[in-house]
């Protein structure tokens, strides 16, 4: 892993996490760092699922893969927000 790969994962994770948070209705009680972490995990899992399903990698934007990543980010942000909401008393 190079520094470019790590920085790229952080940027993509931030974008995917932000998109997931925008799609999810309501207010989520999680911070931006946790949103980025959820986005990175969603991006990695979404890419793995897309490759497993045989979605071809293109030179442009892989829309099917992007949709999978955003859906996973919505699920992840929702799950983390629900867990964080329960722990605050």
Image (cartoon, rainbow, N blue to C red):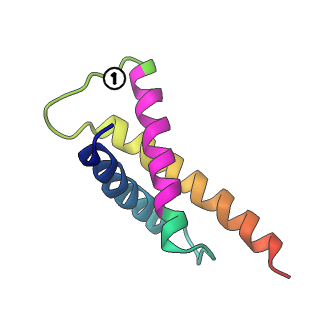
| Secondary structure under the numbered disc 1 in the rendered image | loop
- Above or below, 53 against 36 in this view is above
Residue in the picture at 45% in, 39% down: 44
Q: Which residues are magenta?
A: 36-51
Q: Quadrant of residue 5?
A: top left
- Above or below, 70 against 55 in this view is below
Q: Residue furthest right?
A: 89
Look at the image and tell me in which quarter the C terminus lies.
bottom right
Q: Residue furthest front?
A: 2
For this rendering, which residue is in front, 71 or 35? 35
Q: Quadrant of residue 48?
A: top left
Q: Count residues near mark 1 (Cα–Cα under 10 Å), then give few for <14, some for 14-19, many for 20+.
A: some
Q: Does the magenta-highlighted stretch encompass residue 57?
A: no
Q: Residue furthest bottom?
A: 89
Task: Specify whether 25 is left or right of 16.
Answer: right
Residue 71: % across, % down: 49, 48
Residue 52: % across, % down: 45, 19
Residue that mark 1 sits on: 55
Residue in the picture at 51% in, 57% down: 37
Look at the image and tell me in which quarter the N terminus lies.
top left
For this rendering, which residue is in front, 78 or 31? 31
- Count of marks, rendered view: 1
Task: Specify whether 83 is left or right of 72.
Answer: right
Task: Specify whether 5 is left or right of 78.
Answer: left
Residue 86: % across, % down: 81, 71
Residue in the picture at 36% in, 36% down: 65
Q: Residue furthest left?
A: 59
């Amino acid at each position: 892993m190079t520094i470019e790969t790590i920085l790229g994962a952080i940027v993509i994770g931030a974008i995917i996490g932000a998109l997931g948070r925008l799609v999810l209705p309501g207010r989520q009680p999680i911070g931006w760092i946790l949103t980025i972490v959820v986005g990175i995990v969603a991006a990695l899992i979404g890419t793995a699922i897309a490759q497993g399903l045989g979605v071809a990698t293109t030179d442009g934007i892989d829309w099917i893969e992007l949709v999978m990543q955003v859906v996973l980010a919505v699920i992840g942000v929702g799950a983390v927000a629900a867990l964080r909401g329960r722990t605050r008393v």
